[in-house]
Amino acid sequence: MARRRTALIVVAGLIAAALGLAAPAQADTRRQQVDVATYNIYQGADLTPLFTAPNLPELVRRASIAYDQVVATDFPLRARAISRLIKKDRPEVIGLQEVALWKTGPQGGDLTTSYDFLDILLSALRKAGLDYRAVAVDTTFSGTLPISATKQASFTDRDVILVRHGVRVTNAQSHIYTAKLVVPTASGITFTIPRGWSTVDVKLAGKPVRVANTHLEPVAPPVRNAQGKELYDALAQSPYPVTAVGDFNSLPQDVTGPYGTFTTGGYEEAWSTVHDAGRGFTAVQDPDLTNVPSKLDSRIDHVFYQPGRLSALYADVIGDKLRDRTPTGLWPSDHAGLVVRLRLSSR
């Protein structure tokens, strides 16, 4: 009986091939879909108090508080929570922001790594049974400050594109925006804060799609707007369909900022398409990540895409529920993540 059933299946397949019938639509459709995500995973501390320190001793004191907060917000534990969230949807491509690298050491001596968020997260993903690799790393701000009379700490900010095992990618690029925030301080130190963006080309049904990831300036709208326009202009050169993911620090009402630049310039925003501009809040929790209830009340993390070339089928916010926290009560990040399913147009 089993052999007869097998023979019937083979004969049916041969007849379908002879008549030129298409393969099952579900398999073909899946090859034309890609799940992308954006997640600002939080550098571990609020660094903005550093910019208003009135003198050098106060700057050192505030830097020490910031580093203590990095320890307290426990990224190794948060990475496990983030990996559990990612495992639900297993997106093919993930744009990450604030992928921090922290180092410490004696004043005037060598620094050693205390927290490499990229290595920690990749390890947590592997332990969750997920195989991702970093294909584009955009290193932006880096600086070193004393955190006591004898110790110093360095912070390096990075944005990273991860892809799941088996995803074909080419042409990885990383760039720094021309527009940068420059902050002179009363302590005598001037902070220059660059931001950047990366792209990779992902193959869907044999056709490339360009995926961009960015983190735009949060506190200075003129700088942020210039960065958004620079990204938009750069992506306009793409010969392939484009989706841009990231922390744009731009609300849907921001018609003169990055949100408006993209949505009036030929892109649609996935959450608004799928959910008719419903809640979808992604920012922000308290810097210590212990607040209850959630304080997410704004939507600044987005997935933009080019309609006609791509379509949005699904959008889900992750990391926004009390059950998503660590066993110690920490939110996975001060942001929630966003997962979107896009489909390549057959045209």
Image: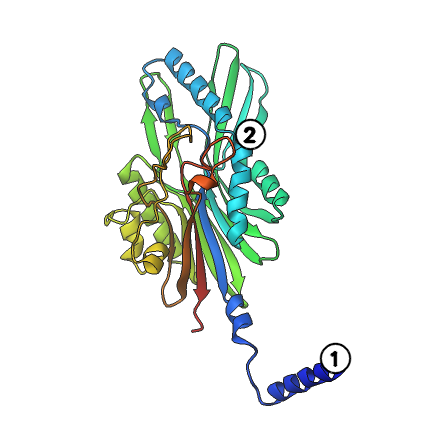
On screen, 336 above or below 342? above
Q: In which quarter of the image is the N terminus?
A: bottom right
Residue most toward the front? 1
Rendered location of residue 125, percent (x, y) = 59, 44
Q: For residue 8, which quarter of the picture?
A: bottom right
Instruction: Name the residue at 54% across, 33% down.
Output: 77
On screen, 3 above or below 281? below
Q: Which amino acid does label 2 sit on?
A: Tyr
Residue underneath mark 1: 2
Rendered location of residue 204, percent (x, y) = 52, 64
Residue 240 visible? The answer is no
Rendered location of residue 142, percent (x, y) = 47, 30
Residue underneath mark 2: 115
Residue 195 visible? The answer is yes
Number of callouts: 2
Instruction: Name the residue at 47% across, 61% down.
Output: 209
Q: Which amino acid does label 1 sit on?
A: Ala
Q: Residue 117 carries which label?
A: none
